[in-house]
Amino acid sequence: MTIQEVQNEIIEEFSMFEDWEERYQYMIDLGKTLPLIDEKYKTEDNIIKGCQSKVWVHADMNDDKVRFTADSDAIITKGIIAILIRAFSNQHPNDIIEANTDFIDKIGLKEHLSPTRANGLVSMIKQIKLYAIAYQTQLN
């Protein structure tokens, strides 16, 4: 699946819920299914700067595709990173770099987050793209 196809799937899933209570619960459920980061990667180097809660993201590359694992100490934040991992993991670095993130606005996520969580969301996306840039550089 392309990033756009995954994002469209996420938009469709969120559109099934009528209110934000249900959407938050869905995000929490997504966080519970997140492939956990190996404990050895829960280091200061892998913490997302700018998040109120602790969020760790690790990336590696296999078959020219970047794979992400993550964890957070907060359930909502864990759900947010789960959505981002789903959208961007197992994709080519250049596709991640070029990817649009407007699906976040389409599911209404940014407008329903506190300012500190919204800043954290931006920081998570930035870090994911920085990993992709680093791996793209290795490919060139």
Image (spheres, rainbow, N blue to C red):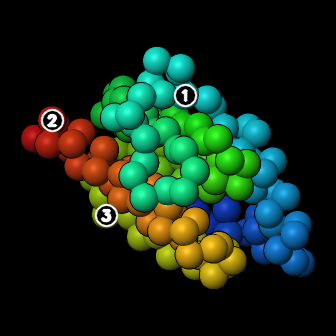
Give the residue drawn at x 58%, y 50%.
Answer: 53
Q: Would residue 105 appear left or right of 90 to someone viewing this image?
A: right
In the figure, residue 73 lies in which quadrant?
Answer: top right
Q: Amino acid at mark 2?
A: Gln
Marks 3/1: CA–CA distance: 25 Å
Give the residue drawn at x 38%, y 34%.
Answer: 44
Q: Residues within 10 Å of mark 3 (few under 14, many from 20)?
A: few
Position of residue 13 measured from the top left corner of the image (x, y, whole percent): 77, 64
Q: Nearer the viewer, residue 101 or 120?
A: 120
Q: Would residue 136 appear left or right of 96 to someone viewing this image?
A: left
In the rendered view, tell whether residue 47 sits above or below residue 62: below
Marks 2/1: CA–CA distance: 23 Å
Identify the element where label 1 is drawn. Answer: loop
Mark with earlier residue (3, 2): 3
Mark with earlier residue (2, 1): 1
Q: Residues within 10 Å of mark 2 (few under 14, many from 20)?
A: few
Identify the element where label 3 is drawn. Answer: helix
Identify the element where label 2 is drawn. Answer: helix
Position of residue 52 measured from the top left corner of the image (x, y, whole percent): 54, 57
In this view, the mark in front (2 or 1): 1
Q: Amino acid at mark 1?
A: Ile
Position of residue 59 measured from the top left corner of the image (x, y, whole percent): 39, 34
Q: Which residue is mark 1?
A: 37
Which residue is farthest top?
Answer: 40
Give the residue drawn at x 10%, y 41%.
Answer: 140
Position of residue 64 measured from the top left corner of the image (x, y, whole percent): 31, 34
Residue 22 seen from this side: yes
Q: Which residue is mark 2?
A: 138
Marks 3/2: CA–CA distance: 17 Å
Q: Nearer the viewer, residue 82 or 44?
A: 44
Q: Which residue is mark 3?
A: 98
